[in-house]
Image (cartoon, grey):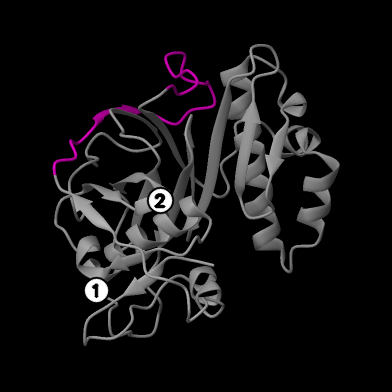
Amino acid sequence: MELAYRTSSHGRDSIEPQTANRANVLHADQPARSTHAIVHAVAPEFVAHPLTRHYPASVAAPRAGELQMWRFRCEWLPVPVQEGEAWLSKVERERARLHPNSALRKRFISARVVTRWIVANLFDCEPQAVDLQDDGNEKLRARHPHDGRGITIDIAYAGIWIVIGIASATLGLSVVVPSPGAMPDDTPEGSRRRARYGSLCNALRYAPVDLDLDLLSSDTAVGAFDLAEHGRWHVLDLPMSGKIRAAVALAQPVTRVQAIGWPKAMVFGEPGK
């Protein structure tokens, strides 16, 4: 199930393939639920860190109100390939083996190796000891082996880029890459709207919510939505290169973003970056 994407006479927006597939199973008799935008959301503090093979010492496990974002190319790893692959669990190695082609297999391995490296540094443990609770769809949870603190992790792919989001609350990532063929809504504004919509879909695990298209079209890069019984969700646009658009949705206000792999020239909280 997913959010019901309500439009005016312009018709339905095109959305990411996974989201579109889930739209096909939305029950017609599902009752509508009102959604309201909250326009006074405040842009969070943005702290940029260069991406290196030395973990940034000032970046700790995110607490309430904090978001940690990582962006790196698919071929980037913090350690040699053989060492990184040895960190993977038996289930992860089997999933990698079953990927339909070598490019997707390499991308999956890179994402999991980097995720384990990040969490191991956050929790001060060995990468192979990290217990990733996986829903099979790049939505992960990890718990500190000593004090029990938990974090939520989401992974998204955008061409040559892998994006990882980490927070103490539930979050959802979405990245929209323009398709080679022209689409009716294949514009920067349409891609941004689909990225925001996809982030809410991913965060809510496709729970049915009636969402007005106009609420996703604001020029403000930070927004909040009161989704009735699903609670209040905060959506932040992520700066990406070229025509790629990305967004992250969280179940709590975001006051501080630790961004690793984003140059300082790309500013969070400004639309169209």
Q: Position of residue 186 (x, y in %)?
A: 29, 77
Q: Is residue 102 shown above or below 55? A: below
Label 2: how many Cα within 10 Å (few below 14, some 14–19, many 20+): few
Question: Label 2, on which residue?
Answer: 229
Mark 1 vs 2, N-terminal side: 1
Q: Residue at x 60, y 27 (%)?
A: 119
Label 1: how many Cα within 10 Å (few below 14, some 14–19, many 20+): few
Q: In this rendered view, identify the residue nearer to me: 194 or 266.
A: 194
Amino acid carrying label 1: it is: Thr
| Residue 80 in which image quadrant | top right
- Tell me the quarter of the image containing the N terminus: bottom right
Q: Residue at x 40, y 80 (%)?
A: 180
Left or right relative to 205: residue 192: left
Q: Mark on residue 187?
A: 1
The mark lying in front, picked from 1 and 2, is: 2
**Residue 273, visible in the rendered structure:** no
Q: Is residue 203 shown above or below 33? A: above
Left or right relative to 250: residue 98: right
Q: Position of residue 198 (x, y in %)?
A: 41, 61
Q: Position of residue 137 (x, y in %)?
A: 63, 55
Amino acid carrying label 2: it is: Glu
Q: In this rendered view, identify the residue nearer to me: 30 or 266.
A: 30
Instruction: Tell me, yes or no, whether the highlighted magenta stretch contains residue 58.
Output: yes
Q: Main structural element of the magenta stretch: helix, strand or loop?
A: loop
| Residue 34 in which image quadrant | bottom left
Q: Secondary structure at mark 2?
A: helix
Distance of mark 1 from mark 2, alpha carbons?
32 Å
The answer to whether the residues at label 1 and label 2 have Cβ atoms under 8 Å apart is no
Range of the magenta residues? 40-63
Q: Secondary structure at mark 1?
A: loop
